[in-house]
Image (cartoon, coloured by chain):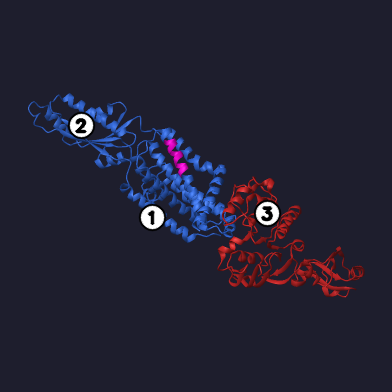
Chain colours: A red, B blue
């Protein structure tokens, strides 16, 4: 039985179709990432599955329970961290976790939750005094109070500094070790690559690809790319003739030339730039990433 | 199921109450702002009517004896006479607390006094009956004034040297709501506190919880929405009762206000008033998009009532065109009922109309709140 089964989900806001016939299955005991740009419909999808919004069409089953019929049961077995989690003012971390615990039939001891999210030192501080990263850890802690089988994290690291982000990744990885199913959305490709067992790429309300991060990158066929910003616009077709180049992507003024022989391609590129009269700026050689997968699928970059 | 509802509501109410106590600003506005007002006004105006007694005289007689009597009363220590042309205006002044007592001198007063003095007519003449209306207020000033008037009348009798009294005072007790200003003020301040706690506190906490997304977060937990609403209302009610107790404590101990009436009726009135204003708070919070606009709207709702709702200033003293508006405000009905019970010991039957007024407003507010209500 899949942890989550979504069939033909549709959600419209007036003219806008936020979720457009989305179907998806998430297996148990995985970290499942939904990667997509802002406005792709990630949060709406998650909120429908969590029970905050109702879909216009489609079905969702969570551990076999029909979302439309069994809302109360589902709430007992899922844990949710919303994109912006707010808790009542003027309560300490401990009091907040205590309060949320009372809402569930079964809940973990508060101290255990606090240690899961590494907030021991801040347990008796007011929530509003915590740093952004600590507040986000508390938000995840609140998603854990009922010892849920499935945990939803909506952009858990957005707005955090790199250190806080790495710290949060550790917390999330521990959830996998504890045998939880985690569904998270993100628009950071490195986050998806590092954390997720399976990544679904979402664009304009639909899943456009779903595989392991390595599998998605492999689908590009090449693992290395020459990236640069030309001083004037260059057509992709002009560069496809470069030696060893297999594919050229142009997105937002940045050109990526995928190649099987970076040395030969780069050499030819420099020569071509001199001949055609454009400058090659910010030249670098990099490994192919989920970002490239996204660009090749949608023609756009993840982040503008 | 029910057990969980209660457990959740209790946990939420406890957290809410704890958070309130940590909010110094809220504690100040809730508890000390009304007290501050009361003490300030109480110290300045509180005993305004104690020193001098005001005796109204309705003199239907144009003779010399009645003029002498009026002068005699005016000459008594701490007494000031105010003349009235008609019974009605004197009665209105009495109920408004402008005078403590009034005396009606019949048209044949001088004639009767004169005939009692004639050598043969004395014993056959029936005595002149003088109606004396006194205010049965909490200060006892009405009774003091009555005693003064009766003493003066008996002095006049003695001076006339007759075996049968010529003047017979006929006292009438008149229930009035206004005694000293502080007596008037305390129920008003209580009403004001109920209003502020209902409108401001509920609008503030609900708008904050919605705008910040706390309600959304609660929506993905199994906690029932009704448990949260019940908890919020209960917490505000507890806070309101604490505030009322504090006001009464300062009023009774600090200013010697004597509390009348059935405590159960008073508690019932406080609950009714609280709930009625709570509906306004919910309506405001659902209508307002942001915390700032909720605060402004709560101000729009409460400020006019604070000044027109019979809290600091009797409606009777307002300009005539204002009186019907002020008189119909929910706070006015509430303060009227609180005064009738708290100061004059009125029972349920006597406060039917103001209670009905509060109920009508509360019901209207309830439907408005339900109509506007939204979680997100």
User: What secondary structure is found at the residue carrying circle 1?
Assistant: helix
* Residue identified by numbered label 2: B66
Q: Viewed as shown, does residue B249 lie left or right of A68?
A: left
* Residue identified by numbered label 3: A136
Indicate the quadrant where residue B52 lies: top left
Mark 1 surroundings: few (<14), some (14-19) or many (≥20) residues within 10 A: some
Q: Nearer the viewer, residue A145 or A156?
A: A145
**Image point 76% across, 71% down: which residue?**
A299
Question: Same subunit under labels 3 and 1?
Answer: no
Chain letter, disc 2 residue: B
The region drawn magenta spans: B241-251
Q: Nearer the viewer, residue A47 or A176?
A: A176
Residue lying furthest left in this view?
Answer: B120
* Residue B284 visible in this rendered orientation of the protein: no
Cα gap from disc 3 to disc 2, whole angstroms = 88 Å
Where residue B232 appears, as percent x and y from the top left, is 51, 51
**Image point 11% across, 30% down: which residue?**
B115
Cα gap from disc 2 to disc 1, whole angstroms = 51 Å
Chain letter, disc 3 residue: A
Instruction: Determine contact: label 3, label 1, CB under 8 Å.
Output: no
Indicate the quadrant where residue A262 lies: bottom right
User: What secondary structure is found at the residue carrying circle 3?
Assistant: helix
* Residue identified by numbered label 1: B360
Q: Viewed as shown, does residue B38 lie left or right of B85?
A: right
Q: Is residue B64 above or below residue A304?
A: above
Q: The C terminus of chain B lies in which quarter of the figure?
A: bottom right
Where residue B356 appears, as percent x and y from the top left, is 35, 52
* Residue B274 visible in this rendered orientation of the protein: yes
Which of pointers 2 and 1 indicates the residue nearer the eye? 1
């Amino acid at each position: 039985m899949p942890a989550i089964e979504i069939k033909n989900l549709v959600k419209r806001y007036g003219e806008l179709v936020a979720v457009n016939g989305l179907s998806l299955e998430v297996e148990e005991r995985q970290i499942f990432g939904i990667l997509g740009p802002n406005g792709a419909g990630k949060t709406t999808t998650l909120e429908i599955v969590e029970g905050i919004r109702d879909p216009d069409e489609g079905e969702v089953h969570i551990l076999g329970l029909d979302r439309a019929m069994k809302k109360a049961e589902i709430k007992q077995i899922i844990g949710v961290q919303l994109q912006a989690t707010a808790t009542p003012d003027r309560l300490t971390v401990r009091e907040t976790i205590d309060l949320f615990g009372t809402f569930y039939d079964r809940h973990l001891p508060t101290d255990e939750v606090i240690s899961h999210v590494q907030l021991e030192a801040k347990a008796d501080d007011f929530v509003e005094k915590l740093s952004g990263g600590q507040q986000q850890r508390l938000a995840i802690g609140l998603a854990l109070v009922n010892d849920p089988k499935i945990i939803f994290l909506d952009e858990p690291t957005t707005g955090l500094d790199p250190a806080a982000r790495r710290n949060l990744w550790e917390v999330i990885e521990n959830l996998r070790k504890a045998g939880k199913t985690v569904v998270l959305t993100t628009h950071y490709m490195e986050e998806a690559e590092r954390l997720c067992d399976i990544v679904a790429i979402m664009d304009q309300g639909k899943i456009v690809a779903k595989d392991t991060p390595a599998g998605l990158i492999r689908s590009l066929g090449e693992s290395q790319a020459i990236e640069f910003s030309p001083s004037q616009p260059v057509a992709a077709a002009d560069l496809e003739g470069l030696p060893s180049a297999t594919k050229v992507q142009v997105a937002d003024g940045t050109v990526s030339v995928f190649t099987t022989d970076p040395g030969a391609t780069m050499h030819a590129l420099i020569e071509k730039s001199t001949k055609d009269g454009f400058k090659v700026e910010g030249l670098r050689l990099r490994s192919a990433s989920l970002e490239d997968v996204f660009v090749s699928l949608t023609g756009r970059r993840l982040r503008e | 199921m029910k057990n969980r509802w209660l457990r959740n509501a209790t946990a939420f109410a406890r957290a809410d109450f704890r958070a309130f106590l940590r909010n110094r600003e809220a504690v100040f506005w809730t508890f000390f702002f009304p007290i501050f007002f009361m003490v300030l006004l109480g110290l300045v105006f509180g005993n305004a009517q104690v020193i001098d007694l005001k005796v109204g005289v309705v003199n239907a007689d144009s003779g010399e004896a009645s003029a002498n009597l009026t002068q005699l009363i005016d000459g008594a220590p701490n007494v000031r006479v105010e003349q009235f042309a008609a019974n009605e205006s004197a009665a209105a002044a009495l109920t408004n607390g402008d005078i403590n007592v009034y005396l009606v001198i019949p048209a044949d007063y001088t004639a009767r006094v004169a005939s009692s003095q004639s050598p043969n007519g004395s014993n056959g003449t029936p005595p002149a009956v003088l109606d004396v209306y006194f205010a049965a207020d909490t200060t006892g000033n009405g009774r003091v004034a009555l005693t003064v008037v009766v003493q003066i009348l008996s002095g006049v009798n003695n001076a006339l040297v007759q075996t049968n009294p010529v003047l017979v005072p006929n006292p009438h007790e008149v229930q009035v709501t206004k005694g000293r200003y502080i007596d008037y003020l305390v129920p008003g301040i209580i009403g004001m506190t109920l209003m502020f706690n209902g409108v401001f506190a509920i609008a503030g906490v609900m708008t904050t919880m919605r705008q910040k997304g706390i309600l959304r977060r609660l929506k993905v937990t199994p906690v029932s929405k009704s448990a949260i609403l019940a908890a919020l209302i209960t917490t505000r009610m507890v806070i309101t009762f604490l505030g009322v107790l504090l006001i009464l404590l300062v009023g009774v101990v600090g200013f010697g206000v004597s509390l009348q009436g059935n405590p159960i009726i008073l508690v019932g009135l406080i609950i009714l008033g609280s709930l009625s204003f709570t509906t306004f708070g919910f309506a405001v919070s659902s209508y307002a998009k942001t915390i700032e606009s909720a605060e402004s709207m709560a101000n729009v709702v409460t400020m006019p009532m604070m000044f027109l709702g019979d809290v600091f200033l009797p409606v009777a003293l307002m300009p005539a065109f204002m009186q019907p508006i002020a008189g119909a405000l929910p706070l006015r009905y509430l303060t009227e009922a609180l005064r009738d019970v708290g100061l004059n010991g009125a029972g349920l039957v006597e406060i039917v109309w103001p209670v009905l007024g509060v109920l009508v407003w509360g019901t209207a507010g309830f439907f408005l709140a339900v109509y506007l209500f939204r979680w997100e």
